[in-house]
Amino acid sequence: MESFTLMKTRTASARPVHPRARQLNRLALCALLFVCGTLSAGITQGQQQLSKRYPAPKNVRVVLKNISGTITVESWNRDEIKLTMILESPKANVAPRHNGSGLTIDVMADNPGRSDIGDVNFKLQVPVSSSVDLETKRGQITVSNIRGDLVRAHVSLEGDIELRGISASQVFAQNTIGDIYFDGEFARKGTYQFQSGKGHITIRIPAESAFHLTAAAPTKQIKLGEFWNDKFKNLGGGRKYEGEVVDGRSKVNVTNFNGSITFMRR
Amino acid sequence: MNCEKCQDLIEDFIDGSLGQEDQAKLNLHLEECLGCADVRNDLQAIVSFCREHRGEYSAPPNERALWLRIRNMIEAGESVPASRPARASWGSWISRSWELSFSQLAAAAAAIVLVVSLSTVVGLRRWQSGDAQFKASGPDAGLQVGAANVRDRVSQQQQLISYWNQRVEFNKARWNPEMRETFDRNLKVIDQAVNESFDALTLDPHDEVSEEMLNAALNEKLSLLKEFAAL
């Protein structure tokens, strides 16, 4: 049985300022403290924070399937995973499964038939060479400084995706409403896919990047910046561009149904 | 008394020519055996009907001539198989007993698999190359047929989408209000992409970018519905 550290969120406090008589001042202070106390107690009762550490090899694989809530993944210089989660009420059951090669958290599978559970906000600290496969139906996904094989961030509905300092051979980022921001490097023979239904897709990569690009946006807002060259084919009157940058070592596919696609030099 | 013996005696029983001892045994059996009792009842009903309606059928005017005609028809009927070889051969082919060796069975199964595979491959290729063929048949024809082709495919996808949409609607009531609102808002975004691509394709059926976007949007909608049908 796994044990979690339980912490309550901190209560907020306020100091009343009133220029009247001392008694009235005390009364007002007491009333305010009472109100604040009641409110903060209500908030803390609705939240629960849990954390747990797991030993992990350098190239550990982390799979997280959430229903609703934010996911934040960042690397650290330790051969272990630290999982922190804040559960909103009604609290979901979360039973992480850990084995030698990875950690799997599946909120959907852990709560069969429960459609009314509250948000679960995850924070994961993982070794830098980890592979991360993250899904949520609703909520923001942020991944920082990961240099593993795979980074996959899938928001089925609404939520921004931020991938910063990424150097992985496979990167997939997809949402329906929300921005996608990628700041990283394209590995040789890597595969990179970005898709949004409505939002802005921004890709920030080193100037010397080499890739084969297919970018489609019916809004015609495709800005290739310094990566544009004469070899690019303009299809559909600016709605789609296809071509190679340098030698096209990696494949990059970007689709935005209603929004812009922007390439920036790092 | 067993059933076989009973059914041998039922005819005599109904005719009233059965001995008392046998009749007693038969009655005992018929009280115990519902199957034989049913046979007795049926046979009795038929015999009673025939007795009641005896003499109601008038004899044909010339019985001898009638029998001659019947005999001629029977004799002529014997030569019919020779005059209809195809039907006879089908009948004999169907009615023959099929006892195949293992190798014959394996060969037959392999032949069936080959035929099904080939027809599937040919069908898929035709379906995939449908647009190219339509385009090759001339600009005006291509416009009409291409548009029809897109409409057909959209219609097929819409049927699937409709099925999954029903399943989502069935489950939706259990979701929390925020999830419902978010889902509806996001589905509208995908629907907008579908409609815009479809409108562009209606204006120009050869617009490959719009076709790609339409396919991508429809697939996206389908996968979203499938995912949320399980929520």
Image (spheres, rainbow, N blue to C red):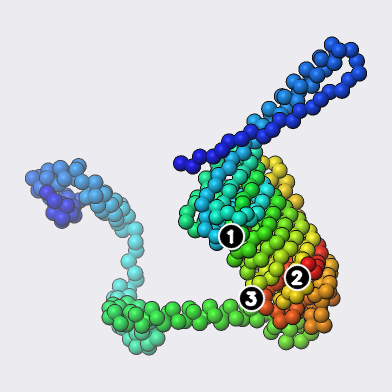
Label 1 element class: loop
Secondary element type, mark 2: loop
Is residue B86 shown above or below A167? below
Inter-mark Cα distance, 2 to 3: 16 Å
Which residue was labeled with disc 3?
A: A189
Q: Which residue is mark 1?
A: A130
Identify the residue at image location x=60%, y=64%.
A148
Chain bearing tag 2 is A
Q: Is residue A24 left or right of residue B22?
A: right
> How far is disc 1 from disc 2 in space, using C-alphas?
22 Å
Left or right of A205 on screen, residue A80: left
Judged from the image, the secondary structure of the residue bearing numbered disc 3 is strand
A159, B20: nearer the viewer: A159
Q: Are marks 1 and 3 on the same chain?
A: yes
Question: Can you tell which mark lies on residue A206?
Answer: 2
* Residue type for callout 3: Lys
Could you tell me which residue is drawn at 67 percent across and 56 percent down?
A: A143
The residue under label 1 is which amino acid type?
Ser
- Tell which of A94 and A189 is nearer to you: A189
Q: Is residue B55 above or below residue B129?
A: above
Quadrant in the rendering for residue B217: bottom right
Judging from the image, mark 1 belongs to the subunit labelled: A
Q: Is residue B72 above or below residue B198?
A: below
